Amino acid sequence: MLTLHVPNSDTFVRSNFKTALKYLKVIAFTHKQIELKELGRLVVCQENLTDKLAQVKEQFNIPEIFYLATCNRVEFVMTTPQAVDKDFAKKFIEAFNTELCHDSLSTFMDSASIYEDQEAMVHLLRTSCSLESLIVGEKEILAQLRKAYEHCKEAGLTGDAMRMIMNCVVKTAKEVYTHTNISKNPISVVSLAYRKLKDLNLCSNARVLIIGAGETNRNISKYLQKHKFSNFAVFNRTVANAEKLAADLGGEAFDLEALKTYNKGFDAIITCTSAVEPIITTEIYQSLLNGETGRKTIVDLAIPNDTAPEVLEQFPVNFIEVHSLNEVAKKNLQERYHELVHAEAIIEQNIAEFIMQLKQRRIEVAMRQVPEKIKEIRNTAINSVFADEVQGLDEQSREILEKVINYMEKKYISVPMIMAKDILINEN
């Protein structure tokens, strides 16, 4: 009886196909269950992120992992055969974010959502299509998701299973944005924040301080520039990035430390950084005022907020933050509700295709050894089992036999693959 032995490398690949869905797990904390101000306490400083992820990956023996943090969610996406329940999630978060006290951790765990297997895949697809976003229809989430994945991929924290998952995630999101009107006349957190800022009727030569040179601030800067604002000062931890944004805006560039000594005054502050502690403290705000006493405006789109709560208590401020956009977001969801049905149908179709793809790929890997085994059987038959009979044939008979065996060999190789694929198609 012939036994098919699949090499270790093939076993690894086949395992990855299985892992891609069966072992997919997501631990999610979102705006749906947690106040946005509280959600910020789960965010980890970007400088420490890779090391912390590598640490918990090793500690909990997780094959692949990546971390997503936006203005309305913090999520951990992983592949692991072990059970991911509330008990596991609590230990995981406790190890990942050591700054949370016991009571805070318990509160967060009560609001955590845990997804696994196909449910986890559906959640990722819905997230990438903005169906889980505060602002349904905003495309920024797809870019944020891809960036989060790429960061962890470059750090060696993900592998082949997550690659296949992300390929499906990106494909599905693009189809939803292309074939539905869910992002027609797109609304985003940035655009909503700018609308509120615009309602304050700042003059076009208002002095605007921009703290942080990331994607959010670059996007809101485009609105400011479009509406003829022209007086900018950009502050960022990496000066080169501040200089790039300042050059686009025709403004000045500074590092973050310069906030302590900046003395040209301001009318509005736009801030969004990845800092986990407030950047605009009462001392810095007092210094930035440079003796002015009028009401100023702060647009703070960071999670957690870059503005210390004491600033709002001690100074007259028009304060615009992500949390204050909730009502507008609810109205936006109602306006786009009829498009959700189309988006859900596309997600369902892509899930089915992905499952079929995984099954087909596993069959292909399992069948890789079939051609070699058929050749082995052929050689054994000619050179051993029927060697005497073959030697007794004349040259013409041996040529005919060779042609017959070659023909049958080629046909035999394709038959198992075709039959297996037919079975899969008929089952679905």
Image (cartoon, rainbow, N blue to C red):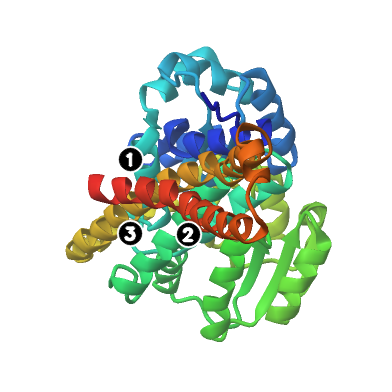
Measured as percent of width and height from the top left, residue 226 is found at: 53, 84
Closer to the chain start, of discs 1 and 3, is 1
Disc 1 residue type?
Answer: Lys
Give the quarter of the image for residue 310: top right
Q: What element carries label 2?
A: helix
Q: Nearer the viewer, residue 203 or 219?
A: 219
Q: How far apart are marks 1 and 3 (CA)?
A: 13 Å
* Residue name at image x 52 percent, y 13 percent: 102
* Residue name at image x 70 percent, y 66 percent: 265
Q: Name the residue under label 3.
A: 136
Give the quarter of the image for residue 144: bottom right
Q: Name the residue under label 2.
A: 170
Disc 2 residue type?
Answer: Val
Q: On screen, 81 above or below 200?
A: above
User: Which one is closest to the eye, mark 2 or mark 1?
Assistant: 2
Give the quarter of the image for residue 139: bottom left
Q: Nearer the viewer, residue 308 or 393?
A: 393
Q: Is residue 152 visible?
A: no
* Badge 3: residue crowd in 10 Å (few <14, some 14–19, many ≥20): many
Disc 3 residue type?
Answer: Val
Q: Which of 335 and 259 is in front in this view?
A: 335
* Badge 2: residue crowd in 10 Å (few <14, some 14–19, many ≥20): some
Q: Is mark 3 on a helix, strand or loop?
A: loop
